Image (tube, rainbow, N blue to C red):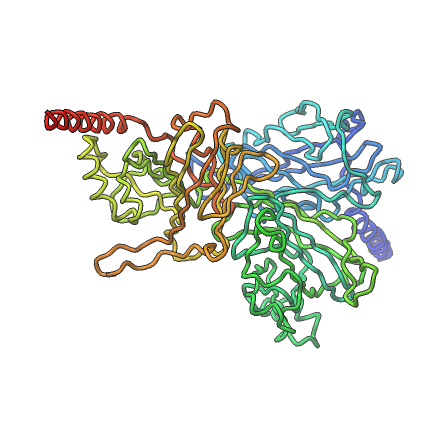
Amino acid sequence: MSLNWVSIFILFTTLPFTISQSPATPEAPAPAANTCNGVFLSYTYNSGSKLPPDNPKHQAYRFESTLTVLNNGLEQLKQWRAFVGFQHEEILVSASNAVLFDGNSFPASVGNGTVFAGFPMSDLKTAVMTAGDLTQMQVQVKIVGTQFGVGLRDVPMPKNISLANDGFLCSPVTRQGKSELHVCCTKDANAKSNFTVDDNFLPRQSGDLTIMYDVTRTYDSNYWAQVTVANHNPIGRLDNWKLSWDWMHDEFIYTMKGAYPYLADSSDCIYGPQGTYYRDLDFANVLNCERRPTIIDLPPTKANDTTLGLVPFCCRNGTILPPSMDPSKSTSVFQLQVFKMPPDLNRSELTPPQNWKINGTLNPNYQCGPPMRVSPSHFPDPSGGPANRTAFASWQVVCNITRPKGGSPKCCVSFSAYYNDSIVPCKTCACGCKSTSQTCSTTAPAILLPPEALLLPFENRSSLARAWADLKHRTVPNPMPCGDNCGVSINWHLHTDYSRGWTARVTIFNWDETAFPDWFAAMQFDKAAPGFEAAYSFNGTVLDGGNDTVFMQGLPGLNFLVGETDGANPEKDPRVPGKQQSVISFKKKDTPGINVPLGDGFPTKVFFNGEQCSLPSIYPTSDGNTKSSALLFSILAAAFVLLLIQQQ
């Protein structure tokens, strides 16, 4: 009996101690870490198992692995980032102590590799600063995911691993056995920085679009934050923007000013832990309890609303213009009140949301990084005093324009010229192919068109295209090529070419029902831009900096591109696109050697509202001009001979 009491005593005195200590003790780094005097990274494959269903040709397997980042250097590693070169169609399901740097949420496809960013511990201190405390020097990311094609006998290892922070050089990756990769990264002695970094904050970064998350008021259970979306790209833009993020600690939005949730719903709180904790809170007044809310802008009519508005730079229907077009409209601002959950009930315990995403209607794709802690922002004192107010905490999210692999443009360009009477149309399926019952070829090249076909929707062009091909003695593919499926198409027509200059005509067609207020287009050239003279129905300028891009927008009263409308007789006539057109003139004295017909007079890149458009792969040729010139010469010669005969 006494032995049993002794056993129980030993159990109760040792078990809690073991449990409490194990989470705080990280796994020891690999022995190879001792030889690295910089940042040591290792990737270890831990285990795997086969997943249903059986598919010998494309079998799925679960894998578990650990990514370790250890700072053995003399400088603190701020906002650590690590690249893992996955290569087996991996789908990540979870990752502890990290988020994906591109802003994607789990599950995420990372078959081409991905960058992890630290969360919640984003900075790694040094051994000197911590007396070798691994809990502050090292982070271990436990990864769980699915991969394809690599069986249990083999190990699905990534191609490589490396530190993704700027200013580091990494040694070649070494392999330990079948299941472990090591790499050591040290500071690049030649790397230079134009920033003076404060000990506590990273310098603010530049990007196509930046988002500031500034905490302006803070209390134990909630805080107010101001979100500022600023466009820095001279040809970037957002229309009807939608902004989303992930709350990491069960936060929820109580109220907002200057913007509104796409879904106003508090049911997730009522049936979740928030409703259990905030028993006395009236959740009928709570705006949104989604873990990943989507925020939209308010219309201009709400700008002076005492409840929802009165926030500078708010309420513009989600339009953010480029600074080159209107600096006062290149920023959007809103405020929100955020309620926190235990154990974060402290006014200094502030955690920004993660995995930021922003997109628009017909706009570029933006990829956003994780929020980085920066020096607190300054705001004008609301009372009008001379001193500025300082935010309690500030984070910056940097977003850059990207084109996803396999993604389709949203606009396209056709080419034509004075020396050829055919139009080189937009590419087949330039903006993606739709599944239709009508048979068409997605691979056949688009066929040349008569000029009047540009005014017709693609589905109404077939008879004209066939007749034009028959007239020109050209073969027609069977089946006919599919349409371009673009909401906006732009025709660039070389109008004239003479000794001192040349002109082009630009026509913009809107085949969508959505109108584009404050539209703009930008044409990038290899040689022609320095010779730009004037746009006669548009407001045209050459952008500063590169000196290769002509920026155009509608003149006052002509800056609204209407959507597609019904024809005069909707039962018979095809729908009519919205149109804007202008002639543009260029001088040749500033572009010596320019050859306009051979390609220098055509843009190499075209953007509409910030979205890069698809361009044809060929230019109009002068073959048609040769035949027409010969015919014209014959007619003039015959007329001249006839005139001589009559005079005799």
Which quarter of the picture shows residue 8? bottom right
Residue farthest along the front direction in this orientation: 648
Where is 72 relative to 292, above or below? Answer: above
Q: Is residue 292 left or right of residue 121?
A: left
Q: Nearer the viewer, residue 294 or 341?
A: 294
Q: Quadrant of the C terminus?
A: top left
Left or right: 203 with respect to 3?
Answer: left
Q: Position of residue 511 (x, y in %)?
A: 37, 51
Residue 78, relative to residue 339: is it above or below?
A: above
Q: Position of residue 279 (x, y in %)?
A: 69, 75
- Between 561 and 514, which is closer to the camera in this rendering? 561
Location of the N terminus by quadrant is bottom right
Is 546 located above or below residue 515 in the figure? Answer: above
Towards the viewer: 471 or 60: 471
User: Residue 644's spot in the image, x, y percent?
Assistant: 14, 25
Residue at 61% across / 36% down in the picture?
Answer: 545
x, y percentage for residue 416? 34, 36
Res 448 → quadrant: top left
Please tell me how many numbered marks the rendered image carries.
Answer: 0
